[in-house]
Image: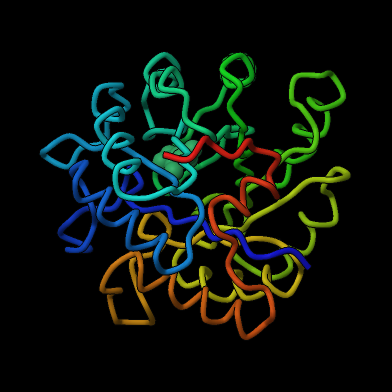
Amino acid sequence: MDKLIITAALTGAEVRKEQQPALPITPQEIAADAAACVAAGAAIVHLHARLADGSPTQDKAVYQQIIAAVRERCDAIIQVSTGGAVGMSAAERLAPLSLAPEMATLSMGSVNFGDEVFINHPADIARFARTIQDYGIKPELEIFDAGMLPTAVRWIGKGWLAAPVHVDFVLGVPGAMAGTPESLMFLRSQLPPGATWTVAGIGAAQLPLAVLAIVLGGHVRVGFEDNIFYRKGELATGNAQLVARIARISREMDRPPATPDEARDLLGLARPAKR
Ligand code: KMH
Ligand code: ZN
């Protein structure tokens, strides 16, 4: 099996510092955390931006500061969010794509999201997909519910998404598909040929689904965006602690963590000129 690509979802749009004091918010905090996660075994950092007061933003200038700070500190594959936060407009969500990150997320449908609704109109998804493609960015297809994967397969057929796709199964969002092995096994069985995949288990589902993905040949996303605990009742000390645990398990399972460049090779991304 291939080496394991670990994605660190550092900040997200929803978690608050009051819930997790180690949550990185400022560009410098995010960059320091990204570097710690890469040192612990992560290859990709999934980035969201926040304003100084902690509120989520898709502001290009803030993303620019974050990306510059991360690039100064480490060689991580930078993946920006086009999901942003619930309620943001499509135009807002598109903003960071013009910074030419290597990867960007692309949510493949609408879904209940806790007490809110994460709306992804097909016309907006098509616009995001086109823009991502125009910038030469590799999309990561966010699959929150069962109907979103056949949508992706249909879109590959229409030529709106380039195969092989890279997919993230986000499992355990209240209102979406459960964070269970059965969900993961079902979705995996529906993947289009050649697809690579990762799993982001929410909350208590993070560790068991990560372990299952290691066994099944998938990849793993961990981090405070999805889960703030190390174990029940014990907050993680930092994103890097969550990454380090997966790296340890992956080594034991003979799927050691991929470096950023090894992950680029696995995902079909060009290796950047040495900085
Ligand atoms: N914050 C969620 C509403 C993504 O990054 O693309 C959407 C999200 C997905 O986080
Ligand atoms: Zn996200």
The answer to whether 54 appears left or right of 36 in the picture is left
Q: Residue at x 70, y 50 (%)?
A: 266
In the rendered view of the protein, which quadrant contains the N terminus?
bottom right
- Image location (x, y in percent) of residue 102: 53, 33
Question: Residue at the location (29% across, 34% down)?
Answer: 68
What is the residue that sits farthest to the front in this orientation? 274
> In the figure, 113 relative to 243: above or below?
above
As rendered, which of 101 and 187 lies closer to the eye?
101
In this rendering, is residue 222 above or below 215? above
Q: Residue 221 location in percent, x, y?
A: 53, 59
Which residue occupies 70% across, 38% down?
A: 148
Quick one: 21 or 262, which is closer to the camera?
Answer: 262
Dividing the image into four equal quarters, which quarter contains ligand 1?
A: top left
Q: Is residue 102 left or right of residue 61?
A: right
Q: Is residue 237 above or below residue 4?
A: below
Residue 47 picture location, percent across and down: 38, 42
Tell me the residue at 54%/62% (across/down). Answer: 201
